[in-house]
Amino acid sequence: MSDLRATATRLIAYAGAPPGIVLGINTPDLKASVSAGYRTVEWEGDVRRGMAEMTVETHHDLASVTKVVATTTALIRLVSAGMVDLDAAVRRYLPTFTADATVRDLLLHRAGLWEWYPLYITPDPVEALPLRYEPGRERHYSDLGFILLGRIIATVFGADLSSAVTDLVTTPLGLSSTRFAHPAGEAVATSARDDRVEMTMLDTGQPYPVPHRSTEFTGWRHHSIDGEVADGNSYHAFGGVSGHAGLFSTVPDLLRWATALANYEEYEALWRPDVAREFFTAGPDESQALGFRRYRLDLPDETVTVLGHPGYVGCAAGFVPGRGIALALGSNRLLVDGPPVGTEALFTELLTTTGDLARGVAR
């Protein structure tokens, strides 16, 4: 516990670091969650001052962690039930999507879609947007692919995505603090200062050269984003409910989710173990499974694979299948003046600390 607390304190102590952080580890030998710093801040000019304290029970905007907690987990259940075929063309479920891509391609980020596009500006639905790459050839991480996957879930389940995820994921796994669009409790970490990041993406064409500029949209938020989804497409185009972003949750709930996936063979009432194992397998890109990112975790005498995902706002979660290892991170990394530290870097620190604790190495 002291090593984990020391890591949390260290991660908020340098330039570009988040003002607050929560770290959680659940293994057969250790169950611990710690918090440090502040969940909200205010600025006096360019000077940041911490306000409300970050706690383990603070609610966080999961951003892209939604892709695995909601969308991928729901699809594991639907594939297990024979309601979705991974190798079926996307157009079987979404007839207006005419590109030659499969559900598996979407999960592997190999469907040829744009990485990102401002759907709150374009009059065209995501299904009608032209591809940017040839389908099936290369991995290009895409929010649009998971927006489509969310629509497939809703279509197959016969309900809106929020209801489908409630029935398929959060209720059966006991994730009482996890919901779309708004946090389930009052203590919430500020997601962002405003919509400046997305406005900058449009006006610079970086990192994606979309043919739109911020002046084409009048709904920008110029206030601190508290209890609202930070992601522009999720918030402005979809009301906070989408397959790529929109969930709020807590680190304890993320650990519950990750522990269930780590012990997946104990949940045959929810999914088929062989289907779960297929989702966990890399390919053809070693760092990418079906929906899940793959990370390295060095344990005593062996290296294992952590499956999980980071989120842009500052959260991440992961698990080691069959080993009972679950990890979760919550932070508000965007509340800085200069370039923020990356969520991947924060999660890597949690992985390193987990390995050190397993080996009995003091940090």
Image (cartoon, rainbow, N blue to C red):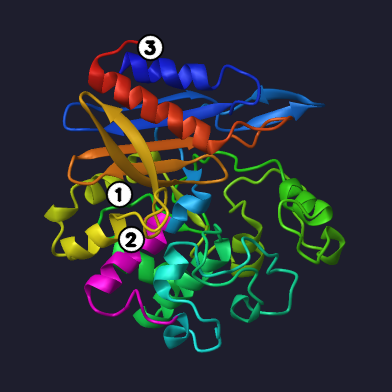
In the rendered image, which residue does mark 1 sit on?
257
State the extent of the magenta-drawn residues as a range: 68-89
**Amino acid type, callout 1:** Trp
**Amino acid type, callout 2:** Thr
The mark closer to the camera, 3 or 2, is: 3
Please give left or right for residue 353 compared with residue 301 in the image: right
Q: Residue at image x 34%, y 54%?
A: 282
Does the magenta segment cover residue 82? yes
Please give left or right for residue 194 compared with residue 25 in the image: right
Q: Position of residue 247 (x, y in %)?
A: 47, 55
Q: Position of residue 241 (x, y in %)?
A: 52, 65
Q: Residue furthest top?
A: 362
Q: CA distance from mark 3 to mark 2?
A: 34 Å
Q: Residue furthest right?
A: 215
In the drawing, what numbered circle is on residue 73? 2
Q: Position of residue 5 (x, y in %)?
A: 39, 18
Question: In terms of depth relative to the viewer, which is nearer, 140 or 1?
Answer: 140
Q: CA distance from mark 1 to mark 3?
A: 28 Å
